[in-house]
Amino acid sequence: MRYVASFLSGYLFITTAFALGVDMDGAKTIKSDKIEYNIKTEEIKASGNTEITNASGQKVRADNLSLSKDKTNVNANDIELWLGSHVYVKAESITRNEHETIAKDAEFTACDGCDDYGNAWEISSKTVIHDSTEKMLYFHNATFWVYNDTFPILWLPYYEMPDPTVKYKTGFLNPSVNTTNDMGTQINIPLYINFSNRHDLTTTFSYLTKENPLFQAEHRLNLHHSEFRSKGSFTHNKQGENRWHFYNNDKIELGENARAFVYIARTSDKTYLQKYGFYDYQPYLDSGAKVELFGQTSYVVADAHIFQELRQAYGNQHSISGNILPNIRGTYQTDPFFEETYLNFSGDILGVSGDDTESQRLIGEARIISPWTLWGGNRITLSAATRYDIYNFDKTYIYTDNQNSESFSGVKSRFLPSGYIEWGLPLYSAENDWTYIIEPRARLTVMQHVNNKSVFAVNNDSAGRFLSDTTLFSNNRYAGLDVWENGNFIDYGARWAAFNNDHNIEVFIGQTYDFDTDNEDFNENGFRNGFSDYVGRIAYTRKYFQISSRARFDREKTSLNHTENSVYVGKDGYYLTLGHIWDTQPIDVLSNDEGNTHEITAGAGLPITKRINIRGSVIYNAYEHFVQRHSGGIYFEHPCYYFSLEYSRDNAIKSDYIGNTTYRFQFGISIDGKHY
């Protein structure tokens, strides 16, 4: 009897659910006033009140349900079907004939029991037809209601949608609306086109009241070992200009030890991305390709870059000069051959071209590293390295001995031997539930003395030596490889930390002394008479609270030259973030032009109710005394639907772009927590 009941309930449940276009798990229990099985015709009939529940808790209720021998014909009255936690279908009667199921006087909602006030939305239809071949639901004479048939908001004579078994289906997506001060209202109508489960395309037509239409497309393709992504836009504006952008990002796996990347980012002009809302405040666009080869102890990467500058030109310090074709870097590390001592070999090939000039650089370095742990926990690391550079210049402006610049074609080379010894002593202690760590640390670096103002090329890859807590104890404290460290120097500092299950505290302070720095070299970079500014950081973290600060402190003027601070407080949707950066320094190592920065950022989130949140952010340029950007919005998240209204203002001024105020409205429905 248990077998027969399971057999009958399985057929009834699965077939009834399938008639409405939903795949269900096998049935678990069946309750009915009367169940009949005709041995001759192999028909099943359930009379009276019938309830079937499957293994996952989904259930069907029906009256007078019958199922034919081949299970292609189903008839039932007063059907109720719970397809998910909140997905509910009800019909006065249902009839299935081969691949077509017809439900009369049907109701559908994905918001059953989500709200104390009733169903947030539902669709009622005189007739619902499900085609199992096309996997489509067709609604005839359909009405969209909110809150239990209380408010009808939309009536359609005909409406269609894919059934719940369909993951991808070609069709229009929910539109969105935004408005800007210089282009008016923008209505975005997206169309989703599905080619396969791994291949699709979204196109968007945007109507603008003050400008010509905008066309957008986003293409996605997944293969077994590759991903291809591309998107772009195009418009022919009222001034007769063709304006566009195109982004591409492809990842191709070439086996267990190799992979390749292709990336393209181009736009028609400097202001298009900002004007049409595609701008992520990036200073430039980078296009190129990269190949990576990696083994257990080796790594090689070859890449090429073609840049497009988006910033206003204020001299070479604000512009990327030339394209990188190619850049090949490789490193190989040996297994330890004595205790923990190992060798590291690295190479770097770089080609830069642009503005009718070219240069190529070849760097080779061999380094031996030998770490030791001695008595008392003392840790000593010894290292020695040799590096050789070869440059080939073609019509490249380089610095001369008197600090002028002139065009030069030819080969130059230089040799740099170096070595360091580093000491550290981490000390641990525990008291109650706290753990304390204090670690003094020092590194002495011996290097060939070089005049850093003879950096060969005017446009080099180094922005300067601005010491920070992150560059202390590093092999090269410059931003790039063209400018060298200046002879012998020693780094020293100490770190203190304390933590338990709820708290984490860290403090670090350090300094460097350059034995070969002239008194006037790098004065604005924090070096005076060989001593650098003090650098440090402090951070405290608790469950709902984080604060951190990084600083560079002038040891002679007893003032800050650089500071970065951040604070975060948040819990249960409430949050507050504060950020501050202040810096005074020249733009690069060879310039005395000021590059002062003073910026304040803030953000906050405030939950008005369980489902309504207000969020906002602002960036204030305190150096020039104006609000750079600010934005905010109200967000409503319901289990069955969502909407948002956002506002943003960008006060940037660049060419034909003079600030922009944007309002954006979005609305969509949710089914079992997924947005549509």
Image (cartoon, helix red, strand yellow):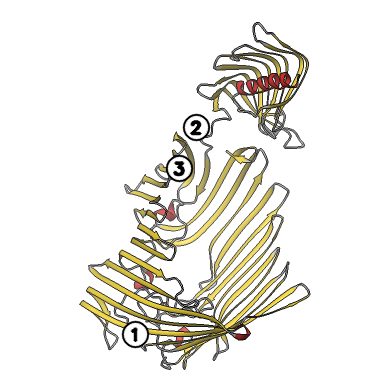
Residue annotated with mark 2? 169
Residue name at image x 34 percent, y 79 percent:
387
| Nearest to the observer: residue 227 or residue 569 | 227
Residue 7, given in percent of the width and then of the height, sits at: 68, 20
- Location of the C terminus (image quadrant): top right
Of the image marks 1 and 2, the number of the one nearer the N terminus: 2
Q: What element carries label 3?
A: loop
Dot 3 amino acid type: Thr
* Quadrant hosting residue 49: top right
Estimate how packed mark 2 is, as few (under 14), some (14 to 19) or many (20 or more) residues with alpha carbons within 10 Å. Answer: some
Gap in angstroms between the C-alphas marked 3 and 2? 31 Å
Estimate how packed mark 1 is, as few (under 14), some (14 to 19) or many (20 or more) residues with alpha carbons within 10 Å. Answer: some
Residue 313, given in percent of the width and then of the height, sits at: 36, 68
Residue annotated with mark 3? 209
Residue 258, given in percent of the width and then of the height, sits at: 39, 56
Residue annotated with mark 1? 453
Dot 2 amino acid type: Lys
Q: In this view, does 611 lie above or below 394?
A: above
Of the image marks 1 and 3, the number of the one nearer the N terminus: 3
* Label annotation for residue 569: none
Of the image marks 3 and 2, the number of the one nearer the N terminus: 2
